Amino acid sequence: MMRRHLLVARIALFSALVYVLSWGTSYLPNVNFIFFIVFSAGFLWGAVPGSLVGLIGMGLWTAFNPYGPAPAPIMMAQVIGAAGSGLVGAVFRRSNWQRGQAPTLAGRLILSAFLCTVIFYLPVNMVDALLFQPFWPRFVGGALWAAISLGFNVLIFPLLFRATKRLYVRESAF
């Protein structure tokens, strides 16, 4: 079991990564590393720490981004949706991810990327469409923007998982 102060420091570090990397990709629409970072935190330390990374990191980004803060209902949907990626990471860790061939692992990571994206964008797009009406055109437009994020996540999860796996090996030694 990792000491509590080390876990708190890791949650803070990953939350800061969410915020800083969101700034770094803010000029690329819906391209960000939030989902993978929160997924990795959930994978490494469990559902609660992973969700906290999503809550804190997305809360910071939503409140202090270069385009101004989101309206409160959308902010809540974003923060809750981001926390969901930590849950997906924790479930992935428990899913016998080490068994099987590389294509199987890549397929599971792609499924995880899909789940993280949907868990985030479904509530965000629903709240956005309810607030700014008309519902269906706004919701479908949001879904098209979510497709950009999904495409990026489907690429990034299998490509960067090797770094998370390496952290997993190092963290297992604690």
Image (cartoon, rainbow, N blue to C red):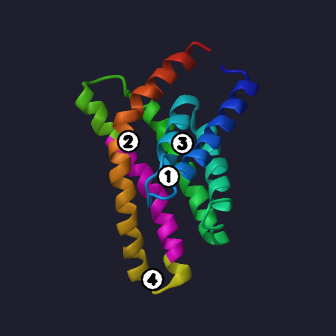
Residue carrying label 4: 135
> Where's residue 90, x and y in %?
51, 36
- The residues colored magenta run 110-128
Residue carrying label 2: 156
Residue type marked 4? Phe
Name the N-terminal-most of marks 1 and 3: 1
Q: Secondary structure at mark 2?
A: helix
Foreground pick, 108 / 145: 145
Q: Are marks 4 and 2 in contact (CB under 8 Å)?
A: no
Neighbour class for label 3 at 10 Å: few (<14), some, many (≥20)?
many
User: Which residue is located at x 63 percent, y 37 percent?
Assistant: 49
Q: Are marks 1 and 3 in contact (CB under 8 Å)?
A: no
Residue carrying label 3: 38
Residue 1, picture quadrant: top right
Residue type marked 3? Val
Name the N-terminal-most of marks 4 and 1: 1
The answer to if 93 sits in the magenta stretch is no
CA gap, disc 4 and disc 2: 31 Å
User: Which residue is located at x 65 percent, y 44 percent?
Assistant: 52
Residue type marked 1? Thr
